[in-house]
């Protein structure tokens, strides 16, 4: 029986510090996909691409780690799109898919990075994380961060 690959997804809004997430996520998975918001792309269009990419990745393997790295916007369109992206990602993360994950990693993890700037954008991301965590219980770990420094660097087996 072949074992499905553990896959990570990195989603980056415009003007976000996303590149520093590549190595920490790579340490948790066998393969990582990156979805960057394109120049002129609306938050809703990005959310549509993220939904399609998450579904594609789930067909290839187990989506066990993901990071949504927010930009500086926090307007209603952006917050709505973030909510859609989070739901799309979580719908493809399954509890108990630790498979070949590093020892001690019991649940898939979604990192929500509001960046290192203080203000409403950070509070908005923390509020989204709080709502999501209440809805999903402990089946997926949802962590808000200010960059990947809080991500333990682990190597996928």
Image: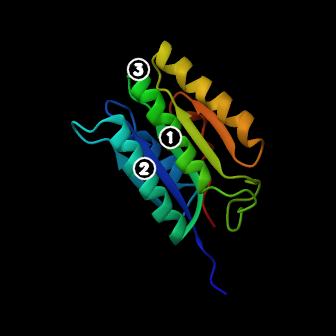
- Residue under the point 43% across and 44% down: 11
* 40 vs 33, nearest the viewer: 40
Q: Which residue is mark 3?
A: 75
For disc 2, the neighbor class at 10 Å (few under 14, some 14 to 19, many from 20) is many
Horizontally, residue 50 falls left or right of residue 88, namely left
Q: Which residue is mark 1?
A: 84
Quadrant location, the N terminus: bottom right
Kind of element beneath mark 2: helix
* 112 vs 89, nearest the viewer: 89
Q: Name which quarter of the figure residue 13 lies in.
A: top left
Quadrant location, the C terminus: bottom right
Q: Is 5 rendered above or below residue 143?
A: below
Q: Name which quarter of the figure residue 149 lies in.
A: top right
Q: Is 138 rendered above or below residue 95?
A: above
Residue 63 location (% of width, % of height): 58, 59
**How many angstroms separate mark 3 from mark 2 (CA)?**
19 Å
For disc 1, the neighbor class at 10 Å (few under 14, some 14 to 19, many from 20) is some
Q: Which mark lies nearer to you, 1 or 2?
A: 1
Kind of element beneath mark 1: helix
* 67 vs 84, nearest the viewer: 84
């Amino acid at each position: 029986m072949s074992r499905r690959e553990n896959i990570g997804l990195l989603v980056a809004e415009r003007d976000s510090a996303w590149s520093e997430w590549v190595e920490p996520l790579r340490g948790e998975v066998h393969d990582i996909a990156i979805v960057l918001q394109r120049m002129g792309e609306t938050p809703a269009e990005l959310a549509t691409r993220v939904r399609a990419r998450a579904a594609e990745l789930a067909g290839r393997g187990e989506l066990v780690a993901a990071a949504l790295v927010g930009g500086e916007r926090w307007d209603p369109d952006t917050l709505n799109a973030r909510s859609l992206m989070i739901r799309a990602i979580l719908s493809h993360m399954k509890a108990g898919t630790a498979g070949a994950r590093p020892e001690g990693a019991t649940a898939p993890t979604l990192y929500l990075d509001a960046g290192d700037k203080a203000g409403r954008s950070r509070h908005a991301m923390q509020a989204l994380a709080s709502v999501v965590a209440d809805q999903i219980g402990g089946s997926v770990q949802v962590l808000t961060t200010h960059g990947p420094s809080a991500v333990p660097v682990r190597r996928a087996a």
